[in-house]
Image (tube, rainbow, N blue to C red):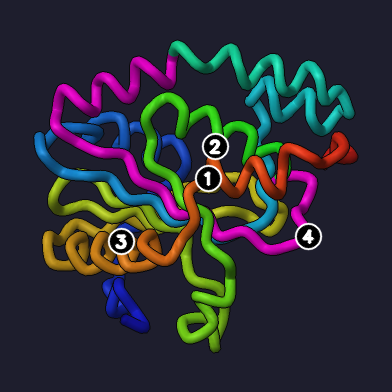
Amino acid sequence: MRDPLRASPGEPLGLDAYREDFRRRDFAVAGCDSWKLERRQHFREPGDASWEAFVQGDWPEALRLIETQRTELLDLSRLAARHRCRLLRVRVVEMPLTPYLQWELHLLRLRAECGELIRVLAPEHLAVYEREGPVPELVTLNDDTVYEIRYDAEGALEGAVRHLDAGTRDRVAAWIEELYELGEDIGAFFSREVAPLKPPAGG
């Protein structure tokens, strides 16, 4: 599946509109899994206390602040379970790890411990899809919604393009599921590739 969106134009949403739309639609339809594909190797996350500590070079504080999110993430997983929804994510990881990704993988490990189903995918599996550029960052929601997440040049969230179509949602979900099946469980990857690393330089 070379183009899961099939040139669907979608509707651009600014940052505030995207966040509000996502909150309004989240778990609105029971029994629908949410699939996420993360491709970029570096993001900026201003406003996230752990990320702020990381970029300031305070690695112990960054890890401590990740752990403080456990209760919130457990609550999210319980909410999803009540709606019979699974949260599934494919995280593309290039080696060697960027400092940002070393930080994010600690957060993703916590998410997995709290119930999110996460696998790590080597970029080689995307080569056939990326002849003209990286694949987009994608999230499916409910039975008819896909968000193509948009970031600025430095990796800060700008908003999304919303695609409202059940066929598009099903194609994107099926494609991400194919990638998921090729990936490695984040727990095993983390133990082998992340846990032994020294603290990264602030990103």
Distance CA(mark 1)–CA(mark 2) = 8 Å
Distance CA(mark 1)–CA(mark 3) = 15 Å
Badges 1 and 2: C-beta atoms under 8 Å apart?
yes
Q: Earlier in the sequence, mark 4 or mark 3?
A: 4
- Badge 1: few (under 14), some or many (20 or more) residues near its Cα, within 10 Å? many
Q: Nearer the viewer, residue 194 or 28?
A: 194
In the rendering, which numbered label is found on residue 96? 4
Distance CA(mark 2)–CA(mark 3) = 18 Å
Residue that appears at 65% across and 41% down: 191
Which quadrant is the N terminus positioned in?
A: bottom left
Badges 1 and 4: C-beta atoms under 8 Å apart?
no
Compared to residue 138, the image places residue 67 above or below, namely above
Residue that appears at 41% across and 48% down: 89
Distance CA(mark 4)–CA(mark 3) = 25 Å
What is the magenta range?
Answer: 72-101
Q: Which of 28 and 175 is in front in this view?
A: 175
Question: Which residue is label 1 attached to?
Answer: 186
Residue that appears at 75% across and 54% down: 97
User: Please, what secondary structure does the residue beneath circle 3 have?
Assistant: helix
In the rendering, which numbered label is found on residue 108? 2
Distance CA(mark 2)–CA(mark 4) = 18 Å
Question: Which residue is label 3 attached to?
Answer: 177
User: Please, what secondary structure does the residue beneath circle 4 have?
Assistant: loop
Q: What type is the residue that disc 2 sits on? A: Leu
